[in-house]
């Protein structure tokens, strides 16, 4: 038996680049890299040539120019004298607003429906099944169009809320006389501040002082709450008895909020009819209301399925074991079933939030001025800079998606099963 | 003993009493109601709320549906009929708009004499997918094929297909059914041919055009097969041969063949596509092309070659990060910048490419999930058997991984099909918005809002719902785990 000389590879030959498994992957990678780069170079050279032929340049300078168009729905001060960049910012904030509210409502709807679908009540679980199947299997665009048609065709005009000669109005406000849907806008109660000390200017940003105060108070309450919880946990670890802290938590959040409300004179104003229009409350553009409703209902149906699957994924043995340990129904739900269900629910929930954010670009169907409508719509058409506008818009959407999935992944990592 | 017994026991039952009916509250409808609807205070409240919702829906929508009119030539006439029949102020559905314009919702601006072509293509599609999707159950395969054959033929007759076409179609339907039954491989060949047949049926023109494109694939495959010993070189040579055929030979050969033996259908411009023909064309093309692309992307993303993996990750994350609308706008606005000057190709083709890329990225993530869910032992076992990478993927890994990912794959398909409605924003005539808007723009049907939405929504619901049910069925059939 002869020993093979160890550690001596056969000398390298060129054919090994193709035949030898160790080197072949290098060849393939080099090939793929060259092909992709050639393709990219081809695209870029075509683009350069085409731009030159049309006499266009590629620069983002137009973003600093005067936009010259109005945006009916804006969270930050904006006029037609503002720049295109600011218009894009308005659009981005509008996209974020409708997406954030949509995610919130969709989650509420989804959790409710998902739990009710598992209910032992025959009628309710059937109704929820119908809702989920009907909304999931029909395009979102249809829901947007249908709800828009409901608002424009079936809702009363603002003046219909006015009592006629015989003292009865042909339309009445809903939800305890606080919301008035009309065919042009939906009037909802608004928060009003009596003593506003004026905006706080931080560099380019200007924030309203009450809002800032509330945010600071909430953040501080949250930080102290965390500290209290950590202390309670430490006490529990040391003595086995967890001190009662719920009233501290309640006070932490409520006391500053009530105090600040009294200080600034914060109160709710319900809309009322003045002349032929509603005033006092906030008149929300129907495009926004429709988009929000459609996105929430549509995504809610998907989230309901996710929640149902998550709860069903926790085996019965888990809750039975918890019951055998002497836990009651609520602790079983809170300490045993939900933490395990959340682990299954969170990853698909993240992708639903991402879908909702991307689907908010369907605002194009209702005329809500989101990012696509400002930067990718009016700005694009006015300046004729398709290339820059589209690329910028895609980059913003991409960044938005990556940020959302990044944040949610961090949360996901915190609830994930801690394995060795 | 018995004597004693007789004296000590006063009464002995020697026959059974007839069974009494259970108490009212423990049987039948009452029990069911108590268990399922009124088992506690909370459930009772929920039931009452549910009943209120049902009552609200029925009381609002039933009058409208029951007052529907199917025979009228305009919206005004409809309203007049409703007012006459059910009194002034009654509202009702005017489904006459569907009756009058159903052909536009289904076929867009396709020439009416050619309606049989998309119909035949749609029907034949079921024969193309039967050997791939309905292999598990003979009964289901037969049902699908029989229903597809009968309906396709019947609709082609009703839509006025010429007798010669009907004869060919009948022969094809019978032949394909037999092929599926007796020669599974032959049926698979038809599945591969079907895309070219469908393109020819939909767009028309000379049959030799699609045939010569198909020939390119055959040429490439043949070259690869001959040189298969040389591994990578064979793949490259095959691709080059096919590309060479398409660039230099295909057009000429098609022209010559058309001159020798003309086989042609009247040409239909892409502009004429609309309604569900458009939605289904884009949807099916996207579905068919996104699955292989998705598999390749998923394998690339799980590859141990960093460069390949990086490109796959970049592509997938980019596509998944932007809304489909922006990609469609890229197709309509920017593609002209990216292509050589003077290139201008069909908008439907551009949209199909974008939709395919979009769906492929999602598909890749779904399949990657399936690959990740597979136990490592399967990969190691494939290696231990001495299979090379592609054989291992084809024989061991992918069949199992794809099976795990069926719900996700079908979910992506459904999403893609629903997303085809977004083409409305680049000016194509989708059934939901653009087509309905066009019909509403005529004087006769101004104000017909709900009926088109109900009609198109119902069709979308039926198609998507049956896809999701089929995936659930397939999941059940393919379950082979040890539980």
Image (spheres, rainbow, N blue to C red):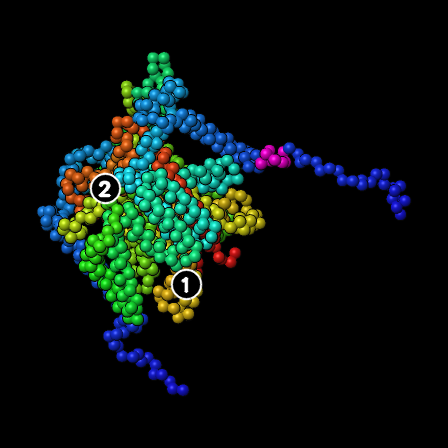
Q: Tell which circle, 2 or 1, labels the residue nearer the N-terminal end.
A: 2
The stretch of residues the image draws in magenta is: B25-32
Above or below, comparing residue A1 to residue B77 in the picture: below
The prevailing secondary structure element of the residues shown in magenta is helix
Please name the residue that numbered disc 2 is placed on.
B271
Please tell me which residue is depicted at 76% across the width and 40% down the height of the picture: B16
Q: Secondary structure at mark 1?
A: helix
What's the CA distance linking mark 2 and mark 1? Answer: 45 Å
Q: Quadrant of residue B304?
A: bottom left
Above or below, comparing residue B98 to residue B477 in the picture: above
Tell me where residue A177 appears, x and y as whole percent: 38, 24
Please tell me which residue is depicted at 70% across the width and 36% down the height of the picture: B20
Please tell me which residue is depicted at 26% across the width and 33% down the height of the picture: B438
Tell me where residue B248 appears, x and y as whole percent: 18, 59
Residue at far right of view: B3
Horizontal relation, residue B356 to residue B465: left or right: left
Q: Does the magenta portion include A153? A: no
Horizontal relation, residue A378 to residue B291: left or right: left
Residue at far top of view: A166
Q: Chain of mark 2?
A: B
Q: Choose between A45 and B451: the one closer to the eye.
A: B451
């Amino acid at each position: 038996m002869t020993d093979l000389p160890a550690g001596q590879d056969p000398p390298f030959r060129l054919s090994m680049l193709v035949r030898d498994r160790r080197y072949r992957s290098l060849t393939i990678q080099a090939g793929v890299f060259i092909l992709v780069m050639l393709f990219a170079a081809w695209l870029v050279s075509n683009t350069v040539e085409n731009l030159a032929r049309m006499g266009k340049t590629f620069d983002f300078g137009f973003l600093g120019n005067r936009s010259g168009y109005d945006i009916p729905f804006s969270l930050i001060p904006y006029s037609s004298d503002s720049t295109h960049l600011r218009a894009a910012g308005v659009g981005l904030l509008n996209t974020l607003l409708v997406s954030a509210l949509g995610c919130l409502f969709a989650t509420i709807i989804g959790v409710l429906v998902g739990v009710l679908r598992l209910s032992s009540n025959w009628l309710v679980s059937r109704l929820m099944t119908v809702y989920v199947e009907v909304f999931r299997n029909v395009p979102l665009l249809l829901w947007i169009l249908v709800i828009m048609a409901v608002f424009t065709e079936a809702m009363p005009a603002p003046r219909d809320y006015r009592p006629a000669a015989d003292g009865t109005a042909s339309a009445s406000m809903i939800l305890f006389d606080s919301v008035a849907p009309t065919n042009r806008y939906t009037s909802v109660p608004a928060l009003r501040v009596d003593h506003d000390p004026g905006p706080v200017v931080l560099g380019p940003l200007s924030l309203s002082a009450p809002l800032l105060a509330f945010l600071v108070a909430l953040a501080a309450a949250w930080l102290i709450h965390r500290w209290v919880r950590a202390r309670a946990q430490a006490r529990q670890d040391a003595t086995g008895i967890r001190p009662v802290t719920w009233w501290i938590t309640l006070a932490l959040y409520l006391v500053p909020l009530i105090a600040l409300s009294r200080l600034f004179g914060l109160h709710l104003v319900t809309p009322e009819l003045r002349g032929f229009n509603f005033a006092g409350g906030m008149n929300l553009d129907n495009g926004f209301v429709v988009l929000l409703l459609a996105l929430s209902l549509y995504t809610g149906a998907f989230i309901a399925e996710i929640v149902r699957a998550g709860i069903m994924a926790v085996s019965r043995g888990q809750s039975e074991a918890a019951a055998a340990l002497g836990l009651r129904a609520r602790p079983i739900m809170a300490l045993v079933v939900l933490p395990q269900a959340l682990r299954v629910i969170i990853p698909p929930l993240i992708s639903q939030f991402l879908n909702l954010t991307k689907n908010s670009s369907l605002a194009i169907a209702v005329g809500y001025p989101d990012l696509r409508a400002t930067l990718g719509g009016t700005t694009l058409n006015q300046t004729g800079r398709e290339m820059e506008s589209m690329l910028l818009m895609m980059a913003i959407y991409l960044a938005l998606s990556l940020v959302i999935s990044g944040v949610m992944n961090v949360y996901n990592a915190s609830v994930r099963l801690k394995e060795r | 003993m018995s004597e004693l017994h007789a004296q000590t026991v006063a009464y002995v039952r020697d026959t059974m009493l007839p069974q009494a009916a259970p108490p009212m509250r423990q049987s039948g409808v009452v029990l069911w109601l108590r268990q399922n609807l009124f088992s506690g205070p909370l459930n009772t409240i929920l039931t009452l709320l549910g009943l209120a919702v049902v009552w609200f829906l029925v009381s609002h929508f039933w009058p409208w549906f029951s007052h529907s009119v199917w025979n009228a030539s305009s919206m005004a006439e409809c309203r007049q009929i409703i007012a006459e029949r059910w009194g002034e102020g009654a509202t009702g559905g005017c489904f006459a708009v569907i009756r009058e314009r159903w052909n536009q919702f289904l076929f867009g601006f396709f020439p009416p004499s050619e309606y049989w072509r998309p119909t035949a293509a749609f029907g034949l599609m079921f024969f193309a997918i039967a050997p791939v999707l309905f292999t598990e159950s003979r009964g289901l395969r037969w049902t699908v094929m029989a229903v597809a054959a009968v309906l396709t033929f019947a609709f082609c007759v009703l839509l006025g297909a010429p007798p010669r076409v009907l004869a060919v179609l009948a022969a094809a339907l019978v032949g394909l059914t037999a092929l599926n039954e007796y020669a599974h491989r032959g049926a698979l060949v038809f599945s591969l041919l079907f895309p070219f047949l469908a393109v020819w049926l939909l767009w028309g023109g000379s049959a030799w055009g699609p045939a010569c494109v198909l020939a390119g694939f055959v040429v490439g495959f043949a070259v690869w097969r001959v040189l298969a010993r040389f591994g990578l070189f064979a793949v490259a040579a095959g691709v080059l041969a096919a590309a060479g055929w398409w660039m230099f030979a295909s057009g000429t050969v098609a022209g010559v063949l058309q001159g020798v033996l003309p086989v042609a259908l009247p040409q239909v411009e892409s502009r004429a596509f609309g309604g569900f023909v458009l939605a289904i064309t884009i949807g099916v093309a996207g579905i068919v092309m996104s699955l292989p692309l998705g598999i390749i992307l998923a394998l690339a993303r799980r590859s141990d070659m960093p460069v390949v993996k990086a490109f796959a990750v970049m592509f997938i994350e980019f596509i998944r990060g932007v809304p489909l609308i922006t990609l469609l706008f890229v197709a309509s606005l920017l593609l002209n910048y990216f292509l050589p000057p003077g290139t201008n190709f069909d908008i439907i083709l551009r949209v199909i490419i974008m939709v395919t890329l979009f769906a492929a990225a999602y598909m890749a993530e779904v399949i990657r999930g399936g690959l990740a869910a597979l136990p490592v032992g399967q990969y190691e076992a494939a290696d231990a058997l001495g299979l090379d990478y592609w054989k291992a993927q084809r024989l061991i890994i992918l069949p199992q991984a794809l099976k795990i990912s069926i719900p996700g794959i079908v979910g992506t398909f459904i999403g893609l099909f629903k997303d085809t409605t977004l083409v409305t924003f680049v000016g194509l005539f989708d059934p939901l918005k653009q087509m309905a808007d066009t019909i509403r723009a005529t004087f006769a049907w101004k104000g017909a809002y709900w009926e088109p939405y109900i009609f198109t929504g119902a069709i979308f619901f039926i198609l998507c719902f049956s896809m999701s049910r089929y995936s659930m069925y397939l999941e059940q059939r393919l379950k082979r785990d040890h539980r």
